[in-house]
Amino acid sequence: MTADLTAVAGAELATDQLATERLAARATAPAPRPKARAGPLEWILIHLTFLVVSVFFLVPFVWLLSAAFDAKATAYIQFPVEPTIMNFVRIFTEHDFGRVLVNSVFVAVATMILVVATVALAGYSLSRLDLRRKDWITYAVLLLQTMPISATMVPIYGLARQLGLRNSYLGLILIHAAIELPFLIWLMKGFFDSIPRHLEEAAWLDGRSKLRALVEIVLPLARPGLGIAAGLAFLSAWAEVLMVVILIDQDSLKTVPLAFYEAMRTQGGYVEVQYGVIAAMAVIYLLPVMVVFFAARRLMVRGLMSSTRGL
């Protein structure tokens, strides 16, 4: 009984000492600093900066929408007195914009499929397989991304001409894919690095082959990374201008970027810019970009975060 009372007294004493130490620590700890509040001048500067940046980005879209529905559009913002869809009718009747749009969609979708299939296999190989000089290969792939596209114009033109790839869908698709592959291979390698290896090893123990484990286990987990690869490949091929100008000069194969050039016509030695037609083309041209962005934005964010953790 005496031993129990001694133990209880000792526990109470230890508790009192711990409470005393905590109170002393709180007393000696520095008081939290009050949160700094922005003064009136800072508040005005912050909101003014936000307003200027917003106007800078919104003005082109305001002009685009107003000019697209204005039969007498100019280079300046002027809201149409009588809005009309005549500019949209003209691009499909006078400029054959329907076929041009189909060409662009076909090239962009084919490029996306080729890029996704390639980066999935290449990124997985660099991440999982025990390759000789793997680090050298990885950094060589990334080094290719630093090469400016303008420096490759002449070699690409000569190679495409020798291989008969000028004025062909195949040439455009291969060039667009080659431009995007270095960065996306590096991105997918980092994403595959973030997927635990023991999941594949468990699949192998269950009797699955490496290819089957890749298809059934790894690729479903890599869906966010594949989503960002697909989105970036589509948007890059959709917006590419330089290679289209170099490789395509047939009307039946032209894409949307070339249609913008045709919206400027020469009359009497002067270039007459059809602002309304160009604006109508641009409005339709932006729609697939917005659809792809809003459809894949969650996958893109998850893919970027996962690939960054794996690097």
Image (spheres, grey):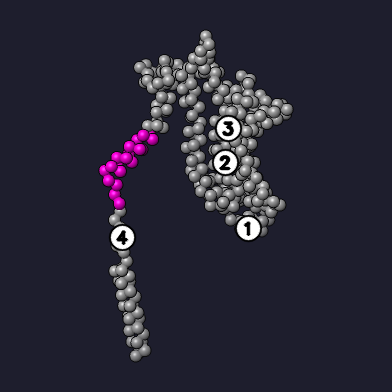
Earlier in the chain: of badge 1 and badge 3, it is: 1
Q: Residues within 10 Å of mark 2 (few under 14, many from 20)?
A: many
Q: Are marks 1 and 4 in contact (CB under 8 Å)?
A: no
Neighbours of disc 3 within 10 Å: few (<14), some (14-19), many (20+): many
Give percent across and percent down for residue 108.
58, 32
> Which residue type does callout 3 highlight?
Ala
User: Which residue appears farthest toward the top when viewing the image?
Assistant: 268
Tell me which amino acid carries mark 1.
Answer: Ala
Is residue 38 covered in magenta?
yes
Which mark, by number, is residue 32? 4
Three-letter residue code for mark 4: Pro
Q: Secondary structure at mark 4?
A: loop
Q: Secondary structure at mark 3?
A: helix
Going 55% across and 25% down the picture, which residue do you hit?
A: 257
Residues at marks 1 and 4, CA–CA distance in whole angstroms: 51 Å
Range of the magenta residues?
36-54
